[in-house]
Every structure is written in C-alpha cells, then in structure tokens.
Image: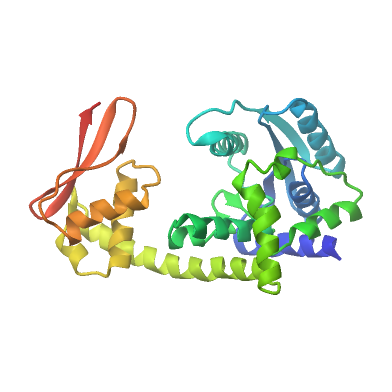
Amino acid sequence: MPERALIAAVRTFAAHHLDTADVCVALSGGADSLALTAASLRAGLTVHAIVVDHRLQDGSADVAETAAGQARGLGATAEVVAVTVDGDGGMEAAARDARYAALDAARRGRPVLLGHTLDDQAETVLLGLGRGSGARSLCGMRPWARPWGRPLLSVRREQTRAACTGWGLRPWDDPHNDDPRYTRVRVRGEVMPLLEDVLAGGVAHALARTASQLTDDADALDAIAAQVLATASDDGLAVEPLLAVPAAIRTRVVRAWLVSLGVRAPSHRVVSAVDALVADWRGQGPIAVGGDSATRFAVVRRQDGLTAESSPR
C-alpha cells in the first residue's frame, strides 16, 4: 500500500539522518507535502507544518489556511507565513528564495522536511543535464543537507496522491504545476513521458539512480579538493599545489575558494576563466567574478598565486 511505503520511507530517513523527532514540514497543500505530513506523524515524529503563502495567486491565503487546517486535523501544529516574491533570476527563482528564507526563519532550530519525490529528482537531473551544469548539478537533490531533509526521494508522485486518497485527504492542485510557461512543467508533462516511451520505461528510476551514484563520486572529489584548498589558501590561492592535481580536483578547489570569497554559485564560465589563470597562464588580465551594487570583485594572478581584488562600480 502506498501509505505504508511513505511511512516506511520517513522512518528509514529519520533513523539515518535525524537526531530529533521534532521536525517541521514544508506544507504547500499539494499531494506530496500533505502526504509527507501525514506519513511523518504516523512514523512517530512531532510535526510543525509551515505553510508559505507566496501571494502570487488570487485566493492564496485561503489555500494556505486550508492546508494548515488539514495539518492540524492530522495532529500537527501549523502556521502560515506570507512572503513577498521579488529579486533576480525570474519568478521561479525568486519564489524559491523567498520560500526557503521563510522556512529557515520559522523552523526555530528544527530540521525541515520537504516533499520532493523520485519524480522531482529525475526532473532535476534532466534539467541539469540539459543546462550543462556539471556533475554536481547531476547529483540532484540530497536526501539530507542540514537542515533540509527529503524523505520521499524513493517514492513516486503517484504514490503520494494515492496515499492522500487512502488517508481521506484532499490535496490542492496548484495551477502553476500545469502552466507550460515553466520549463519544469514541460519537462514533466512532455519530455519525461516521451523518454519513458522511447526508452521503454524506467527512465525516472534510472535518472534518480544516476544522481545517487554521482553524489558519491562528487563527495569523494570534494573531500580531496578541500584538503588541497587547506594547503593552498593563505592570503590568496597558491598556484603550485593546484598544478599537481588533476583538473577535476583543481576546478573544485577554485570553485570552493571563490565561494569562500563570497561569490554566490560561481558559473562554469567564471570557474573556467579563473582556472585558466592557474593551468593556462599567458599573462591574461583580471577575471570578473561578481560583486554587489557598489563593488566589483575580480581575481588576478600575482606571481605564483591568485588574489581577489575589489573596486567601486
């Protein structure tokens, strides 16, 4: 039964990753998060549901209150947090940033469980592949990245909906999930079914399995890169230790160093350009790596090391 599968998934996740039974669940009112709320309670966890109202649709406050009411009816405590969606990167990115900020503020030290399923994982891997985002992107979503937990990454979307039916719950169907203006919606509704047909099924499971395997590989490389960074960084980044390691390690060191400087999610183009200052040094000039409204940051090579410099815009 799907209900048992969800409860088992939550129990397994809790046994492996949680050191507390007191958790939050990010509840949208949709089938995935509603089923996760119910399964978490039935798995013996104490649940506080956080419903984020993005205020992007008419009636969103009513939808949020209904979701919170269902959570309370199941035995959870619940609160609704209204946010303002603005910022760079388009509405999807801005809504995601606002949602995670609200969840982080409301969790009060507790872990937050998210209702992402195996289908979401497969779509994430496919999107990363299509964007050429590299191995880390193809790792998809981690089951546990403190404080965020995803107990349902082994569960199909159809199972969460069936579990809601079995438990007598009425999930909300977000119209944005059927809006073809969003890339993920088209991947879900058009690309994945086509791949399943052409490749004779099993694509979602294969993509999710790929994510798990690549996570193990990426973690091993990241651990080596962290050791190299510890020896190479001292008021800059020394070039010599980086020339002694393979490119897969070197670029990870460069990326981690940039992040330590405050560069948010350095792009492949930026990492490659900074890496060229190490591995393909021909006297090239400063590499712009980001900044804010008032300051521009750039990486330059000085003799046998890289340094970051700032200048006013």
Give the percent coordinates (x, y) of residue 46: 74, 47
Rendered view: 67 above or below 84 = below
Residue lying at the far bottom in this picture: please name it.
200
Q: Is residue 151 visible?
A: no
Residue visible at 17% across and 50% down in the picture = 306
Residue visible at 31% across and 38% down in the picture = 290
Dividing the picture into quarters, in which one does residue 299 lie? top left
Residue visible at 51% across and 57% down in the picture = 130
Give the percent coordinates (x, y) of residue 271: 30, 52
Q: Quadrant of the N terminus?
A: bottom right
Q: Is residue 146 left or right of residue 26?
A: left
Which one is nearer the viewer's eye here, 124 or 130? 130
Q: Is residue 256 left or right of residue 149?
A: left
Give the percent coordinates (x, y) of residue 30: 77, 44
Rendered view: 27 above or below 32 = above
Q: Quadrant of the C terminus?
A: top left
**How many numbered marks are there?**
0
Dividing the picture into quarters, in which one does residue 212 lie? bottom right
